[in-house]
Image: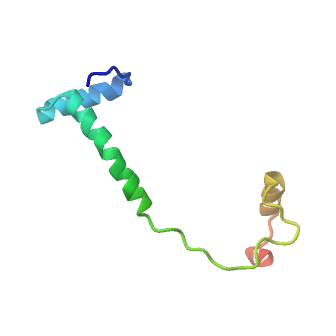
């Protein structure tokens, strides 16, 4: 199938150089890149989840929905032990 796409000029030059170096067409390079995308999604899904540690939750009076108050509390200069 033929289609028209718009590419950044610098990106197109890079792809054109790669195609010439590999003895392939620009279309083949773009086609291979598009086919590789689903594989990247599968790799991203394979990343192990971050560990979750149990605890008592947030400190009394801390509202995680209030960014300004949370920032102020974090910048208050209290030692980490005092916040635990």
Q: Quadrant of residue 43?
A: bottom left
Most extreme residue toward the right is 61
In the figure, 39 relative to 31: above or below?
below
Q: Where residue 61 sits in the image (x, y, percent)?
A: 88, 67
Q: Give the residue at x 74% y 74%.
A: 80
At x 87% / y 71%, what residue is drawn? Answer: 60
Q: Position of residue 46 (x, y in %)?
A: 41, 63
Residue projecting furthest to the front: 1
| 8 or 44: nearer the viewer | 44
Relative to 76, is 56 above or below? below
Residue 81 higher or lower than 67, as above or below: below
**Figure coloring:** rainbow
Q: Which quadrant holds residue 59?
A: bottom right
Identified at 26% across, 31% down, the residue is: 15
Rendered image quadrant of residue 62: bottom right
**Relative side of 41 to 3, left or right:** right
Taking the spot 35% from the left edge, 45% from the top edge, the residue there is: 37
User: In the rendered image, which quarter contains the N terminus?
Assistant: top left
Left or right: where 34 falls relative to 19? right
Q: Quadrant of the C terminus?
A: bottom right
Q: Nearer the viewer, residue 39 or 60?
A: 39
Q: Position of residue 63 (x, y in %)?
A: 83, 61
Q: Say left or right for 42 vs 62.
A: left
């Amino acid at each position: 199938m033929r289609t028209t796409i718009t590419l950044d000029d610098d990106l197109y030059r890079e792809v054109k150089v790669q195609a010439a170096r590999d003895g392939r067409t620009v279309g083949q390079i773009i086609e291979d890149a598009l086919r590789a995308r689903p594989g990247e999604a599968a790799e991203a899904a394979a990343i192990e989840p971050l560990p979750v540690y149990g605890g008592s939750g947030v400190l009394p009076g801390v509202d995680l929905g209030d960014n300004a108050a949370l920032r102020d509390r974090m910048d208050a200069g209290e030692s980490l032990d005092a916040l635990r």
